[in-house]
Image: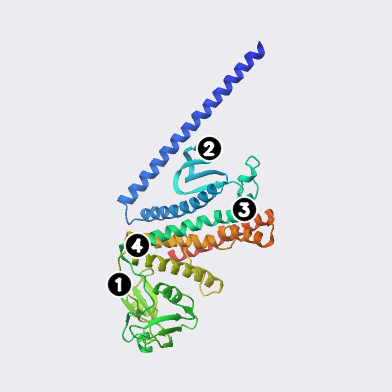
């Protein structure tokens, strides 16, 4: 009898504990919902009433990055579910849980998090068997190699698709991806004195093949110790000539006025005479050639713009990455959070289309960086699977884990260096 009373008492205590836990969960969920509503309201207020301010630019940057991270994770999620891999959770946002649910016959927890910043998905057995409770055939590491490859590259693919869609939309509004044809030459400029004329087409610059004006600008930024630019020019009659041109160095103020630097008018003298302060002027080099500025409309032109600009940006990014290793480009040229904020600040002043373009650019950037065969990136995981294809056996789990850890540390260190350079440039 006493035992029965004890059992009843214990059962009552357990029920009370369950009720307390449920009440705590409801309380936390309510707080998270309130937090989410407050954050969304804050974002809306900032976007509507604080345009052009620092907080506006920060919110815009976070929203852009959130979108790109979300679509990247969505790509991994879709392919993982396609191949029957167990996904613990697919979340929209980060931070505290607001609410979640499970679909019928679907073990994945679909959740909404309080901070509307990107998202994530947790996949079982991404690199090795890490959960005894999940059937082995549901672990990603036990799936066929081709399926693991597709899951890994799905995030990059989504970033590229996002960029293509945005670029197509931009093309529909009217855009022109300039070819390398020269449409005007400034009189008495280095190009004019060399003999370059309107209608000529640039085929190479310093040994790099040129097909668009955008790629020409990227190549022009690479370090050139001799300060001599070698242009291969195709004339209207098909004849090709090579020109070695030394550009004119100049300073441009915030109003667009150009001041040429000469032996007599030095940089320091120009800055002093015109009372130019740091951040109010830019140094540049003038060759004296301009590309086509004609804006074209229509679906066909939009498709051409989308295709041309996408591949030009991809080529440019691989060129920039390669130039970092050959020291033709310094780490100072890279931008971290502070540098990205500065770009967003400038772009928001131009207009919404420019903001869309920056989103597409960053989406391609994220895709290219992630596909690099470097540990900790998606491309690093792909690299180890390719080794498995070649050798016929998996790479040692501990060795692979160490490689990814080292890769993450190196990436984090690079981010700190870039952030430091951003801050120095900002306060300098």
Q: Which of 192 and 89 is in front in this view?
A: 89
Residue 421 image position (x, y, % from top left)? 49, 65
- What SS does tag 1 mark? loop
Quarter of the picture containing the N terminus is top right
**Nearest to N terminus: mark 3 or mark 4:** 3
Nearer mark to the viewer, of 2 and 1: 2
Query: How would you rate the neighbour count of disc 3 (Cα within 10 Å): few for under 14, some for 14-19, many for 20 or more?
Result: few
Kindly identify which residue carries mark 4. 170
Kindly identify which residue carries mark 1. 294
Quarter of the picture containing the C terminus is bottom left
Query: How would you rate the neighbour count of disc 2 (Cα within 10 Å): few for under 14, some for 14-19, many for 20 or more?
Result: few
- What SS does tag 2 mark? loop
Q: Nearer the viewer, residue 40 or 341?
A: 40
**Nearest to N terminus: mark 1 or mark 4:** 4
Kindly identify which residue carries mark 3. 144
Residue 102 image position (x, y, % from top left)? 50, 37
Nearer mark to the viewer, of 2 and 4: 2
**Nearest to N terminus: mark 2 or mark 4:** 2
Residue 148 image position (x, y, % from top left)? 59, 54
Q: How far apart are marks 2 and 4 (CA)?
A: 41 Å
Kindly identify which residue carries mark 2. 105
Query: How would you rate the neighbour count of disc 1 (Cα within 10 Å): few for under 14, some for 14-19, many for 20 or more?
Result: few
Is there any visible trace of residue 337 in the rendered image? no
Mark 3 and mark 2 residues within 8 Å of each other at the beta carbon: no
Mark 2 and mark 4 residues within 8 Å of each other at the beta carbon: no
> Residue at 48% of width from left, 78% of height from top?
208
* Quarter residue 342 falls in: bottom left
């Amino acid at each position: 009898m006493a035992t029965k009373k004890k059992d009843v008492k214990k059962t009552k205590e357990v029920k009370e504990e369950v009720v307390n836990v449920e009440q705590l969960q409801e309380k936390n969920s309510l707080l998270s919902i309130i937090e989410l509503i407050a954050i969304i309201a804050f974002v809306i207020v900032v976007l509507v009433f604080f345009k052009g301010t620092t907080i506006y630019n920060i919110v815009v940057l976070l929203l852009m990055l959130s979108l790109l991270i979300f679509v990247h994770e969505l790509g991994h999620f879709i392919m993982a579910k396609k191949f029957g891999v167990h996904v613990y959770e697919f979340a929209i946002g980060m931070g505290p849980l607001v609410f979640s649910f499970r679909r019928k016959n679907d073990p994945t927890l679909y959740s909404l998090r309080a901070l509307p910043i990107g998202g994530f998905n947790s996949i079982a057995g991404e690199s090795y068997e890490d959960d005894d409770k999940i059937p082995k055939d549901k672990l990603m590491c036990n799936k066929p190699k081709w399926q693991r490859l597709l899951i890994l590259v799905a995030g990059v693919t989504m970033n590229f698709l996002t960029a293509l869609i945005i670029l197509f939309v931009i093309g529909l509004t009217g855009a022109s991806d300039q070819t390398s044809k020269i449409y005007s030459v400034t009189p008495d400029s280095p190009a004019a004195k060399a003999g370059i004329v309107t209608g000529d087409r640039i085929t190479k610059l310093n040994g790099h093949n040129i097909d668009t004006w955008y790629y020409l600008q990227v190549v022009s930024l690479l370090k050139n110790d001799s300060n001599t630019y070698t242009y291969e020019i195709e004339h209207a009659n098909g004849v090709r000539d090579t020109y070695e041109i030394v550009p004119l160095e100049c300073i441009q103020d915030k109003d667009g006025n150009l001041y040429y630097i000469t032996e007599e008018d030095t940089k320091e003298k120009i800055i002093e005479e015109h009372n130019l302060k740091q951040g109010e002027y830019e140094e540049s080099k003038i060759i004296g050639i301009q590309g086509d500025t004609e804006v074209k409309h229509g679906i066909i032109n939009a498709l051409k713009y989308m295709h041309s600009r996408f591949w030009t940006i991809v080529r440019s990014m691989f060129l920039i990455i390669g130039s970092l290793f050959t020291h033709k480009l310094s780490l100072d040229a890279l931008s971290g959070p502070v540098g990205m904020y500065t770009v967003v600040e400038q772009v928001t002043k131009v207009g919404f289309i420019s903001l869309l373009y920056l989103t597409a650019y960053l989406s391609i950037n994220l895709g290219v960086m992630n596909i690099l065969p470097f540990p900790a990136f998606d491309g690093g995981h792909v690299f180890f699977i390719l080794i498995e294809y070649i050798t016929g056996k998996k790479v040692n789990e501990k060795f692979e884990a160490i490689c990814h850890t080292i890769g993450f540390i190196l990436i984090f260190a690079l981010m700190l260096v870039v952030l430091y350079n951003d801050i120095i440039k900002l306060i300098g």
